[in-house]
Image (tube, grey):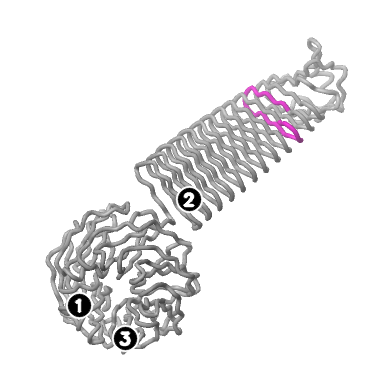
Amino acid sequence: MATFQEAANFDVGDRPESVAIGDLNGDGNLDLVTSNQNDGTVSVLLGDGRGGFAPQSTFTVGDDPEDVAIGDFNGDGNLDLVTSNESDDTVSVLLGDGSGGFAPQSTFAVGDSPESVAIGDLDGDGNLDLVAANEDDDTVSVLLGDGNGGFAPQLTFAVGDEPESVAIGDLDGDGNLDLVAANEDDDTVSVLLGDGNGGFAPQLTFAVGDEPETVAIGDFDGDGNLDLVTANETSADVSVLLGDGNGGFSPQSTFAAGGSVFSVTVGDLNGDGNLDLATANLVDENVSVLLGDGNGGFGAPSTFAVGNEPFSIVAEDLDRDGDLDLVTANDIDDNVSILFNDLNIRGDEGNDNLVGNGDDNELSGENGNDTLEGGAGNDTLNGQGNSDELFGQSGNDLLNGGNGNDLLEGGNGNDTLNGQGNSDELFGQGGNDLLNGGTGNDTLIGGTGSDTLNGQGNSDEILGQGGNDLLNGGVGNDTLIGGAGSDILNGQDNSDELLGQGGNDLLNGGNGNDTLIGGAGRDTLIGGAGRDVLFGSAGNDILVGGAGDDELTGGGGNDTFIFEDNNGANIILDFASAEVIDLAGISGISDAADLFNNHITSVGGNAVINDLAGTTITLDSFDVNDLSADNFVF
């Protein structure tokens, strides 16, 4: 699906017939220009890149300008304007100064009643040329550019009856630009194949709907060949003609759009990689969005209200959020309507509430304490500045908290949550999630599913909950709790507390003075470096103190205690006769005879094992005479 916000309207001149989009002042933000039929002007509205526009500046053009287009005609890097002037049979060229201003018009003669103008390099010389669709003499006029803002006298080529629109593209794949005109009175399109030198072959005609007003070009079925679409006013539909790559087209397929379909534009409006259509519906005062299936078909229209009598529609990303917005020129209201796409939404400096839809949305809070809700789909939520609340909801989502103390909830799906700056709360919830705390003292809770939780900087609280989870504390004094399932807990740096709880868990303390508690299940506890405390709890556990002076308690079950060279002074607080001490990693003790003859003594009622090379093991309150070879592995 594709959804759009309520229309934002901006005033322009008297009876705007067409709208075009480009960066007219070189600031990196897209601007608008309309051709105003009744006052013989164009209106320029400079954009701020966030969807706002300055009040119009007007520039004089010819009589009854029907269409406007944008291009750099003199090669100075600044965008220029051209209008088709119906009543005086000219086109007006206005050269831009790069700051949003334009020089007085230069006019060039074309045919009778030019309704439309298009731009392209038709003769391959690197300069932009013009083509106008002339309604009353059934021709198109080609004006070849000189690269300095001037144009040669027109060359005319016959098309169908009352051409209302012209578009340019390479329709036969030979590298030369071709023309297509929409012919209102004979319900056809005319295709003129270009020779690359500014000339064109006689027209080929293809039937479309009733009174086509506009034609546009795109690859609708993904075969690499350009296809055509027309907006048909009287039949209230669009005609799609799939190209064969040689300049031919299949018979039309029609798709209902709206009342008095007057204009059509092409773009990927829902971010699925397929081209979609949007039409301006004159009588209905709305636009219709038809989503493409990538095979040349289109779904039922979704409609969105705009101004009175929308004559023209274009699609561009006006607020720089990564999705296409729609703009209509509204003939009766003397304004343009902008429909901002909800696929990607960007907040402002205040406290925003941004809500996605069923598409794959990207929501960005910017500054302020924002709330972002992804909804269905695989969404990207960026909290950015200040303290934000991000809710991924359905789908496999990416949540980035940004700076501030943020709350991130993944919802259902396999989500990635990045807390980033400051102290954040991350909840993976359903699915197999990846949680990264970032800097700050963070709380990470995996939820159901087999999750990976990385505390990263500072002192974090990490809880795996359901599933077989991987917990990594990172830098700082962290608390890691595995929860249900067979989990892996890695304390890593500094002094950490690790609690396995349910399942057969693996606990690695890492560096620092760590506390490891296995919980239920057959757990493996590895203290690592530092003075560690290990408590196996229930089950037959394996306890490995590691380097440093460690305290080990097996708890319930028959446990195994493993030691190696240079493991320091260790104590086992609850050794029982059915348990085992693994000395295979101690090179100074070769076998049971060596142990009992040279390395074990009784000290204060405690059995003490000393490899005489840096590792001692004290069995608290355990009589040395109760030990046998069965208690050891060598």
Please identify the residue farthest to the top as the structure is shown. 604
N-terminal-most mark, 1 or 3: 1
Is 339 on the left-hand or right-hand side of 588? left
Is 417 on the left-hand or right-hand side of 5? right
Say which residue label 3 marks: 185
Estimate the spatial distance between the alpha carbons at disc 1 and disc 3, rounded to whole Å: 17 Å
Mark 2 and mark 3 residues within 8 Å of each other at the beta carbon: no
Q: Which residues are magenta?
A: 518-535
* Local secondary structure at mark 3: loop
Kindly identify the residue that appears in the image at 32 percent across and 56 percent down. Answer: 8
Estimate the spatial distance between the alpha carbons at disc 2 and disc 1, rounded to whole Å: 47 Å
Quarter-wise, where is residue 622 in the image?
Answer: top right
* Mark 1 burial class by Cα count in 10 Å: few <14, some 14-19, many 20+: many
Quarter-wise, where is residue 106 in the image?
Answer: bottom left
Q: Visible in this render: residue 152?
A: no
* Mark 3 burial class by Cα count in 10 Å: few <14, some 14-19, many 20+: some
* Local secondary structure at mark 1: loop
Say which residue label 2 marks: 380
Say which residue label 1 marks: 86
Q: Visible in this render: residue 465?
A: yes
